[in-house]
Image: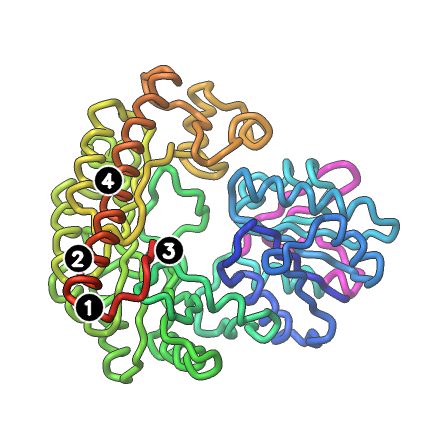
Amino acid sequence: MRILFIIHDHAKSQNDFPLGVAYLISALREAGWENKDIDVYNMDVYHYQPGQLHDFLKRRQYDLVGIGAIAGYWQYRQVMALCEAINSLKNRPLVVLGGHMPSPEPAYFMRKTGADFVVMGEGEIVFTNMVKRLSENGSPHDLKGIAYWQGDKVIVNHRERLIKDLDAVPFPAWDKFPMEHYVLKQRFSTSGAERTLPVLSSRGCLYKCSFCYRMDKGYRMRSIDSVIEEVKKLVKDYNLNKISFRDELLMATAKRAYMLAERILKENINIKFDIDGRLNAVTPEVLDVLRRAGCIYINYGVESLDQEVLHNINKKQTIEEIIRGVELTVKAGINPGLNVVYGNIGDNEQTIQKTVDFLLKYNTYAEIRTLKPVTPYPGCELYHKAIELGLLEDCADFYENKHVNSDLLTVNFTEMTEEKFYETLYKANEVLIRDHFNHVTESAIRAHQKLYFEKDASFRGVRV
């Protein structure tokens, strides 16, 4: 079978490297697929239009097309447009959808797009097994982890078990992608002269926040040896000076983060890096070794500065842990990513003021910080709560009617009217935006003062 993976357009000049597809290609190769029979169509890089995809597929015949998506209104629209273009072909290939978006509600997405299959959850085993079976003209009826058509019915099979030994998964197929584009993507930058690629050192999470759309349970770690081997290869092959560890939660525990940082130091790998962390796992010792190893940014899920709201979303985190963790991170010279959402059950005008005060107090001005409404993505606990409360009907209602923009309410879980909610959110974001750009303005003015009157020749122009 000839296979084409489509990376949909994100309408950005810089894009995250599509790790999921790169892992799938490596799995196919290991299963015996020849490199020449696997292609990638990079709409994210070249901004091809759906009509161009249609013409491309007319010229080059593929047996199967794979499209992945995480979640959200933008990705939904992209997937719909791509499937419409593919469905209009006279010799239409098989269409397989995958990722967090279709996994919770595969039947809806298959009926809506006309896709032939949905791969649910981790795809390395599931997708490879499915392609093998299809290439042998076999039936998919007993394949775990897929949804498929049986006549006019969608059959959803049992989920496949998660991969236990992550070290057995081959490294991503970087050679199939235009890497000189992807190395430019920065999650967090300090110099503007960085070459970065993402690495996964683990999969999953130890926690279950109510708004998280990740369906797979548990937390699995690669060996430090395997992670370091991959980092070294990326640094050597792509001349990287920064790694973005994109685990859902690398700092699940202080011990895990400490071990990785200590090994980077021991191996004398001269890189910067960023990670995701839990504030209740922060200690002075782990921050010190992270900083010395090159960590410049830790992305934290703060979510709320109200203890009742934290309880409502099952965050398993206290206000004291948040304050202590952020203060220690700033003191260690590492920039904290402070992610907060508004509109959870229990949120009101008082809770948003607590958040604004917190963000103003601990703002390092390394990135602009604003608030977004919480979104109950299909598959998460909050999604089912919205249906239970009569605030949402189903997946169709979510994607077709309610979720039109990530900065707008999908469901109002608060006791405020929608008008009052937006008034409160607007005032909060107005304060945060003005504070950020006032700081940027004052910094630019001070830089010019130092240039002209102190002859600071290090100045290289205003950086916003």
Q: Which residue is mark 1?
A: 456
| Amino acid on which the number 2 mark rests in the picture | Thr
Q: Is residue 58 above or below residue 197?
A: above
Q: CA distance from mark 4 to mark 3?
A: 30 Å
Image-quadrant location for residue 44: bottom right
Q: CA distance from mark 3 to mark 2?
A: 19 Å
Is 433 colored magenta in this rendering? no
Crowdedness of circle 1 by 10 Å Cα count: few (<14), some, many (20+)? few
Give x and y (percent) for residue 391.
Answer: 46, 20
Which stretch appears magenta? 133-160
Q: Is residue 27 visible?
A: no
Q: Which of the labelled discs sits on residue 435, or is there none? A: 4
Q: Which residue is mark 3?
A: 248
Q: Nearer the viewer, mark 4 or mark 3?
A: 4
Q: Are marks 4 and 1 in contact (CB under 8 Å)?
A: no
Give the SS element for disc 1: loop
| Amino acid on which the number 4 mark rests in the picture | Asp
Q: CA distance from mark 3 to mark 1?
A: 42 Å
Counting residues from the start of the chain, the first of labels 3 and 2 encountered is 3
Q: Are marks 1 and 2 in contact (CB under 8 Å)?
A: no
Counting residues from the start of the chain, the first of labels 1 and 2 encountered is 2
Q: Which residue is mark 2?
A: 329
Give the SS element for disc 3: loop
Give x and y (percent) for residue 47.
Answer: 64, 54
For the N terminus, the image quarter is bottom right
| Amino acid on which the number 1 mark rests in the picture | Asp
| Amino acid on which the number 3 mark rests in the picture | Glu
Q: CA distance from mark 2 to mark 4?
A: 21 Å
Residue shown at the point (58%, 72%) measured from the top left: 26
